[in-house]
Image (spheres, grey):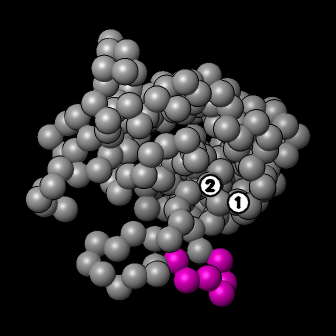
Amino acid sequence: MSNSPSTLPDWAAAWQPMIDAVGQDFAPGLSPPDADPIERGTVRRYLEPLEFDCPLHYDPEVARAYGHDDVVLPCTALMTFALAPAWRPGETIFTSAERDAQPARSAVTGVRSPLEPPTTGFFATEYEVEYLRPAVAGDRLARRGAKLVACTPKETKVGRGAFLTWETDIVNQRGEVVAHMRSSFFRYNPHPGAAS
């Protein structure tokens, strides 16, 4: 936004701490390796509905012949093994029975910062991945970093909020970067009387 903080409307000025934090890494270490290790059987199950018939993904001998330690995870399955589980035994994810209730926590809502003003809505607006090395059966993936690279307050038809862009790496158990991700979200408060 081109306005100085003193001339911004109150709702937009509330995002100034996030604007000032652009460039900061909110999670410089590794995320806990919550995700399951990549297993051959799980990769095969991923391939089934797609009829994805490439032996690199199901035949360890072919994968080894091409220089990999084991079967290669398709790039499109990477987030399945890099995100923390949505549910664990003993947990209650949905804490409300209301229509359109959201889970109490979710790995797909993006990074949340205590510097953000309160918002009640969000949606993803952009997702970009640079794949740097294959992940293979036996790897255990984690996320490293959550660098805020942009915060742009904006009023849209759905409400007032900000577009936030984050960068993070997916790494294997050896600390090797498997992929570099950039994702953007619009976090907002709906206009009064807007349909939800």
Residue drawn at 32 percent across, 35 percent down: 10
Write the start and end of the magenta stretch as one range: 88-93
State the image coordinates of residue 95 (x, y, percent, origin top left).
46, 81
Which amino acid is tagged 1? Ala
39 up-or-down from 22: above or below: below
Q: Quadrant of residue 134?
A: top right
In the rendered image, which residue does mark 2 sit on? Answer: 83
Q: Name the magenta segment's main secondary structure.
A: loop
Marks 2/1: CA distance? 6 Å
* Residue 134 in view, yes or no: no
Q: What is the x, y in percent for residue 7?
A: 31, 20
Q: Residue at x 22, y 44 (%)?
A: 159
Report the front residue among 139 and 83: 83
Residue 193: x percent and y percent? Answer: 11, 59
Foreground pick, 7 / 169: 7
Residues at badges 2 and 1 in contact (C-beta under 8 Å)? yes
